[in-house]
Image (spheres, grey):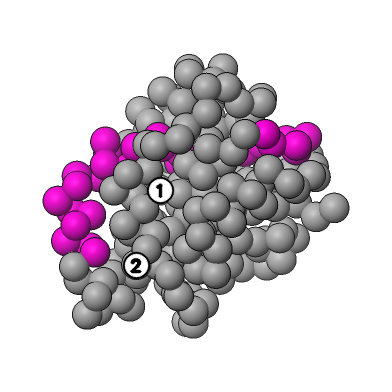
């Protein structure tokens, strides 16, 4: 079975280069709605599950995860605890008329380089709406996992990762000088 990577909002595989090729790579709300992603997580098995941001939030909603190694990157329970709701609503409004501008601004704010070509963004607008109520349905317990969180994350403060680590007894790793995006090289250090 292949490893699974559930990415963040508009976290297209192009952002991760060749690293993405080693995974069954899922971009939530771009071909997969919330229920699709949670069902995929609950029915997949493998060595590594990597979930970034919105993907990590969805993993925290799964009833069971059957992976040898789980790595959550920049996780959160309620997105609007870290990015003000008014900012998110402005993104939603702007997305209706200038989706590429919102996506490009967000990817830049994550701390990653923009690839020349991005994947089709399909249901990304629904993904922004999802973030308004992302705290609903979080599980009470989770299997062992590692949490990576950039010390310079301006989208989801590092305190979110620390709080989740304490709540679920996870190993917490602050990634020095990283923003919301953590490099594939750093992620690779925590794979089995």
Does residue 24 appear anywhere in the picture?
yes
Mark 2 touching mark 1, by CB under 8 A? no
Instruction: Give the image location of residue 166, x and y in percent.
Output: 48, 17
- In magenta, the rendered stretch is 64-92
Residue, disc 2 = 125
Q: Is residue 96 above or below residue 155?
A: below
Q: Badge 1 local density, few (<14 within 10 Å), some, or many (20+)?
A: many
Which residue has dot 1 on it? 180
Q: Is residue 89 magenta?
A: yes
Horizontal relation, residue 58 to residue 84: left or right = right
- Residue placed most toward the observer, 25 or 130: 130
Question: How far across and how far down the image is residue 152, in percent?
Answer: 35, 41
> 97 and 147: which one is in front?
97
Name the residue: 80% across, 45% down.
Answer: 46
- Name the spot of residue 9 as percent of width and height, x first: 43, 58
Mark 1, secondary structure of its residue: loop
The x, y position of residue 33, in whole percent, is: 51, 60
Label 2 crowding class (10 Å Cα cut-off): few <14, some 14-19, many 20+?
some
* 59 magenta-colored: no
- Seen at 72% across and 58% down, the residue is 23
In this rendering, the count of numbered labels is 2
Question: Is residue 190 at all visible to an observer of this figure?
Answer: no
Q: Which numbered tag is attached to residue 119?
A: none
Quadrant including the C terminus: top right
Q: CA distance from mark 2 to mark 1?
A: 20 Å
- At mark 2, the secondary structure is helix
Left or right: 70 as drawn, with respect to 124: right
Residue at 85% from the left image edge and 53% from the top image edge: 1
């Amino acid at each position: 079975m292949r490893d699974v990577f559930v990415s963040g909002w508009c976290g297209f595989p192009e952002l991760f280069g060749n690293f993405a090729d080693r995974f069954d790579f899922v971009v939530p709300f771009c071909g997969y709605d919330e229920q699709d992603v949670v069902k995929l997580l609950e029915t997949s098995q493998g060595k590594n599950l990597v979930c970034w941001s919105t993907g990590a939030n969805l993993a925290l909603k799964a009833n069971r995860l059957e992976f040898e190694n789980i790595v959550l990157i920049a996780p959160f329970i309620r997105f609007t605890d870290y990015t003000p709701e008014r900012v998110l609503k402005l993104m939603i409004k702007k997305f209706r008329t200038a989706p590429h501008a919102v996506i490009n601004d967000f990817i830049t704010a994550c701390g990653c380089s923009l690839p020349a070509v991005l994947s089709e963004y399909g249901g990304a607008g629904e993904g922004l709406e999802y973030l308004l109520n992302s705290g609903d349905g979080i599980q009470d317990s989770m299997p062992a996992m590692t949490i990576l969180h950039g010390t310079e994350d301006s989208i989801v403060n590092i305190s979110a990762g620390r709080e989740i680590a304490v709540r679920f007894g996870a190993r917490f790793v602050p990634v020095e000088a990283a923003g919301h995006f953590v490099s594939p090289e750093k992620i690779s250090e925590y794979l089995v």
